[in-house]
Amino acid sequence: MSSYEARFKVWRGDAEGGGLEDFEVEVNDGEVVLDIIHRLQATQVPDLAVRWNCKAGKCGSCSAEINGRPRLMCMTRMSVFERDETVTVTPLRAFPVIRDLVTDVGFNYAKARQVPAFVPPEGLGPGEYRMMQEDVDRSQEFRKCIECFLCQDTCHVVRDHEENKQAFAGPRFLMRIAELDMHPLDAAEEAGLDRKRTAQDDHGLGYCNITKCCTEVCPEGIRITDNALIPLKERAVDRKYDPLVWLGSKIRRR
């Protein structure tokens, strides 16, 4: 097994402030950035704060920005960097720093609570739901989300404009609304809930300008923009501005 000394810059500090610190640390074949952060903890900075759990790309805990790009540390192999390249690791920029690489992502859980849950169809009990396989597949793509919040972090509506957070749910939760809105068994409309209208009026769908940056950083490869946000926008616009759709919705309610 070959090894070499790599140069790292790691952000250290807390809510009051901080900055990048330089380190030289051993790297071995096959290692990922999280391995190096653990080695730093073990050999040089035992009080370095970092959030992690599974180390398998499934819990979403170890989100950070590596050379300025939102990534999972456990899924970023050291082999993607040149050996003489300095690797910079900083906390997620869109959320408040707690300490070092750990950020307060409570914003996302607050937004999750604002999305109305699946409304079961009347007259059907658990185990009686039936769906076409293509509908199952459509929803299943979105359910691969591990809630790493990299899409939330890279979305410039949240990242660059703190003032938008009150009105904008972000791509992860607009994707959740899209999944429920296209779910053939969701009885939201029968219960008086218009998911398309709430997406537009309550969750800030109009703020999204489909730059696809959320899709580009998704470690699960979910096509957030193409398969969730754009279709949701199309349906919301139809509901709000197409006179025939609007008239049809009024007739159905009667």
Image (cartoon, rainbow, N blue to C red):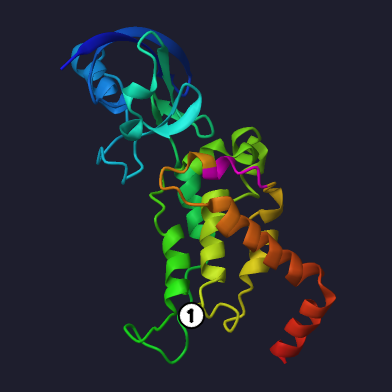
Residue 223 left/right relative to 189: left
Q: Is residue 135 magenta?
A: no
Compared with residue 220, is residue 239 higher up or lower down, i.e. above or below? below
Q: Is residue 248 left or right of residue 133?
A: right
Query: How many other residues sit within 10 Å of disc 1, few (<14), some (14-19) or many (≥20)?
Result: some
The residue located at (60%, 79%) in the rendering is: 189
Relative image position of residue 181 (x, y in whole percent) = 57, 70
Q: Residue at x 45, y 40 (%)?
A: 105
The residue tagged with tag 1: helix, strand or loop? loop
Residue 104 at x, y percent in the picture: 44, 36
Q: Which residues are magenta?
A: 210-215
Q: How many marks?
A: 1
Give the percent coordinates (x, y) of residue 207.
70, 48
Q: Which residue is mark 1?
A: 185
The residue shown at (24%, 18%) is 41
Please say if 239 is above or below 191. Answer: above
**Residue type pointed to by label 1:** Leu
